[in-house]
Amino acid sequence: MTIFLDRILGRKRVLVKANERVLALYRGEILGIFGAGEHTLPNRRGMLELERHDVNRPAFVSAYEKPLFDRLPEVAQRELTVFRTNAREVAVVERDGELHAVLAPNQKLTVWNAAGPWTETRVDLAGGLDVDPELMRRLTRARRLELVTAFMVNDGQVGLLTVDGTHQRMLEPGLHAFWNVGRTIQVRVIDLKRQSLDVTGQELLTRDKVTIRVNIAAEYRVVEPLKAVSEVKDFADALYRALQFAFRQTLGTLTLDQILERKVTVHAEAAEKVRADMAAIGVEVSAIELKDVILPGEMRDILNQVVAAEKQAEANVIRRREETNATRSLLNTAKVMAENPVMLRLKELEALEAIAGKVERLTIHNGTAGLMNDLVQLRDK
């Protein structure tokens, strides 16, 4: 009966659940927004339109948003909240204390008041692009980092911040985050610790036309980071080339023997030029040294032969010296025996004893009378 009466009277009963809001239009005009409960709305000729919204989905998205605010601003403000940013703002929207959305410049978000409570934090980008550390932690937890760029600078390093290609400032060690909306943000991290640079396998020609390869090493550290990255494209490559030139200038004036005979380093004038050139771009160079000299295969063979010949000559000298000493000792022994016949006889007995130990029978034809007589005479005396 009620349904029949509603049809006759041109109306419709609309049931709205607790989690719903209904936007109603009749004959193309907005009637309003209706909350939980049963509502009787006009519906002659079926011209009632209903747009249902679940407030558990906080964002209000409707083609009738502007007409709603224009025709029924009080209703719209009662049911909805609009967050809007200008060209130089970022807004952080929170729902019941939890981060809900981050709005880029010139963005809008309309939400149901019933899904709140809602709060917002606005960031004026004209005052700087830095993201507050506490806000950065909250953005990270909420996984809302699409508008943020973060950089880590470790101990012993410094970061050079550039925005749209223009240097802004240096960053100390720590985590740094920036709003990247409409801007190109870059951080170049420079290591300030002492470092080593090896220049390996450099071929050069000595003064006596021998091609050798050398390995060079240097220690350096960056003392003026901004100058080091702005004066040259790559300060490490600049040092590499400076070392190449310095050692070519030094070793090219020496013969191979001079290079091998002494520990060669870059000469003072060339080293000072390397240090001065690098100091001009903010790099301090300390030790510079030649680590290895590598010879071609055939040159190594020749040098090995030379070394072998030198060692053989030294051995011959030592052998001749020992033979001379031995001959001198024999001569001294002979003089003693010539002056003392008994000593000579004792030597004869030693020789006979040595021989007798190696044979079964030994026959002495001359006898030992002379030796015994000499011994008796010594005893008598």
Image (spheres, grey):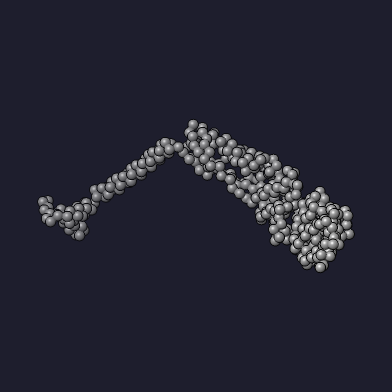
Q: Is residue 134 visible?
A: no
Which percent across, then down, holds residue 319? 33, 44
Q: Quadrant of the C terminus?
A: bottom left
In the image, 240: left or right of 315? right
For the point 17% across and 58% down, the residue is 376
Camera-side residue: 113 or 269? 113
Camera-side residue: 136 or 36? 36
159 is higher (above) or lower (below) than 244: below
For the point 64% across and 42% down, the residue is 234
For the point 64% across and 51% down, the residue is 193
Q: Quadrant of the N terminus?
A: bottom right
Which percent across, then down, holds residue 11? 84, 61
Task: Give residue 96's quadrant in the image.
Answer: bottom right
Q: Is residue 8 visible?
A: yes
In the image, 101: left or right of 32? left
249 is higher (above) or lower (below) than 350: above
For the point 83% across and 64% down, the residue is 6
Camera-side residue: 49 or 304? 49
Camera-side residue: 368 or 364? 364
Which percent across, then down, holds residue 186? 70, 47
Which percent across, then down, holds residue 187? 70, 49
